[in-house]
Image (spheres, rainbow, N blue to C red):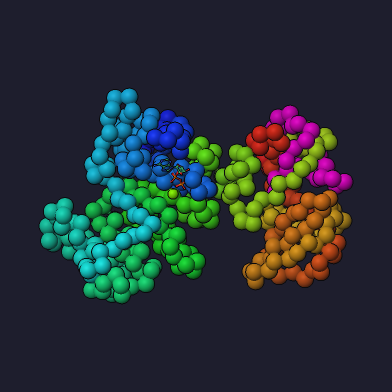
């Protein structure tokens, strides 16, 4: 059964600014949905509207079969009646309370019985692996440990939905990586619906069952992360998902058949193999290809010159120059190239994306 439904939800602030524009979305029960997009695109506003902390200007929001907001009839259920947990970016723990009390406190306020509280807190201490810190105060914990206490506190009353707004942004890179694993595991262990806000495509990619990618208040694509990665609906989406970013190159279409096309990239010929029957392709297009789908080869294919190499140890980002366009390739392990050396590259013909030059829309994908 679908859990949360947003229908034509918009938010226009008092100053006339439209932060969210006619959003439609169904969040399935137990999903891990990430609201993703650049700063200011309306992610937090969307989250706050679902939680009841912000009043939409129009539209309807349904949670678990109950209409919690409807602009026309004036229904507006208060946040405390929406059965949600909210984890904020600055997960302020009560400094004068131990870890145990921080988690138990909310349950005491909800008048849970003492044995029930003890059982629930023990369970959470165990899930989040913080039992050994239960008598400590927040100031005696690392950032990551504090974060886990904050999560335990939010999860304690068993909210049906857990909202998280950039919960990892205050942590250092290594800890952020570890917490990604913990959150993913937590989602499975708790059986609840997670709605997560981030501007970090890697977090969205690795954590989510579905990503809602927004730009200037408008939903661009709502799909599983790999589908967005492999079949982005437009250039903005293609460019936002993936690091190093997708190559976007000017190309011309020489010839097209039912499922193949021959493209010209400057002087070079590139073959394109589509996964479906091709529509009529305009002559000038934008060719998209992800860095991992470009091979450096000894065969005389497309020639390019080495512009720079950026090794990380595990892989090497190779920046190439061909026909005045910079092309990024990623190869596993390390490579040994000289700057300005000429190399041959080859595009995986069934991994190419074709976009409209005029509006950036996807025409066909491999
Ligand atoms: P995000 O979380 O994606 O960074 P927000 O949802 O916080 O974006 O904000 C979306 C846009 O709405 C931003 O341009 C922001 O400046 C604007 N905004 C947020 N709150 C208000 C407000 N109370 N009044 C006017 N504009 C606002
Ligand atoms: Mg925000």
- Residue 10: image x %, image y %? 42, 33
- Residue 103: image x %, image y %? 24, 62
Q: Which residues are magenta?
A: 262-289
Q: Give left or right: position of 177 versus 294.
A: left
Vertical side of 42 occupied by 246: above or below: below
Quadrant that contains the N terminus: top left
Magenta-span inclusion, residue 342? no
Confirm whether residue 98 shows in the render.
yes
- Residue 165: image x %, image y %? 40, 52
| Residue shown at 28% from the left, 27% from the top | 74
| Residue shown at 80% from the left, 60% from the top | 297
Confirm whether residue 275 shows in the render.
no
Is 14 or 233 nearer to us in this picture? 14
- Residue 91: image x %, image y %? 34, 60
| Residue shown at 32% from the left, 24% from the top | 72
Extreme residue in the front direction: 15
| Residue shown at 80% from the left, 38% from the top | 252
Quadrant that contains the C terminus: top right
């Amino acid at each position: 059964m679908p859990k949360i439904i947003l229908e034509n939800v918009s938010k226009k602030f008092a100053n006339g600014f439209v932060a969210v524009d006619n959003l439609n979305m169904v969040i399935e029960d137990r999903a891990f949905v990430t609201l993703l997009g650049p700063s200011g695109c309306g992610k937090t506003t969307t989250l706050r509207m679902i939680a009841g902390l912000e009043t939409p200007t129009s539209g309807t929001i349904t949670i678990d079969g109950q209409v919690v907001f409807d602009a026309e009839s004036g229904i507006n259920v208060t946040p405390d009646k929406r059965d949600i947990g909210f984890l904020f970016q600055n997960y302020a723990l009560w400094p004068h309370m131990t870890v145990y009390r921080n988690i138990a406190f909310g349950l005491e306020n909800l008048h849970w019985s003492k044995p029930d509280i003890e059982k629930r807190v023990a369970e959470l201490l165990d899930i989040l692996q913080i039992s050994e810190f239960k008598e400590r105060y927040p100031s005696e914990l690392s950032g990551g440990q504090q974060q886990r206490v904050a999560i335990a506190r939010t999860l304690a009353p068993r909210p049906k939905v857990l909202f998280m707004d950039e919960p990892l942004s205050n942590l250092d890179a290594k800890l952020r990586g570890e917490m990604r694993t913990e959150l993913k595991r937590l989602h499975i262990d708790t059986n609840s619906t997670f709605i997560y806000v981030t501007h970090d495509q890697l977090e969205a990619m690795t954590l989510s069952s579905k990503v809602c990618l927004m730009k200037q208040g408008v939903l661009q694509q709502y799909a599983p992360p790999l589908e967005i990665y492999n079949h982005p609906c437009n250039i903005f989406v293609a460019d936002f998902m993936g690091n190093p970013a997708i190559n976007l190159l000017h190309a011309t279409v020489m010839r097209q058949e039912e499922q193949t096309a021959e493209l010209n990239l400057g002087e070079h010929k590139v073959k394109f193999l589509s996964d479906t029957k091709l529509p009529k392709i305009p002559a000038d297009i934008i060719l998209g290809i992800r860095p991992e789908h470009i091979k450096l080869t000894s065969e005389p294919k497309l020639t390019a010159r080495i512009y720079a190499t950026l090794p990380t140890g595990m892989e090497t980002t190779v920046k190439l120059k061909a026909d005045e366009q910079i092309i990024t390739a990623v190869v596993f392990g390390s490579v040994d190239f000289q700057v300005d050396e000429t190399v041959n590259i080859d595009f995986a013909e069934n991994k190419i994306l074709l976009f409209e030059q005029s509006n950036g829309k996807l025409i066909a994908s491999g």
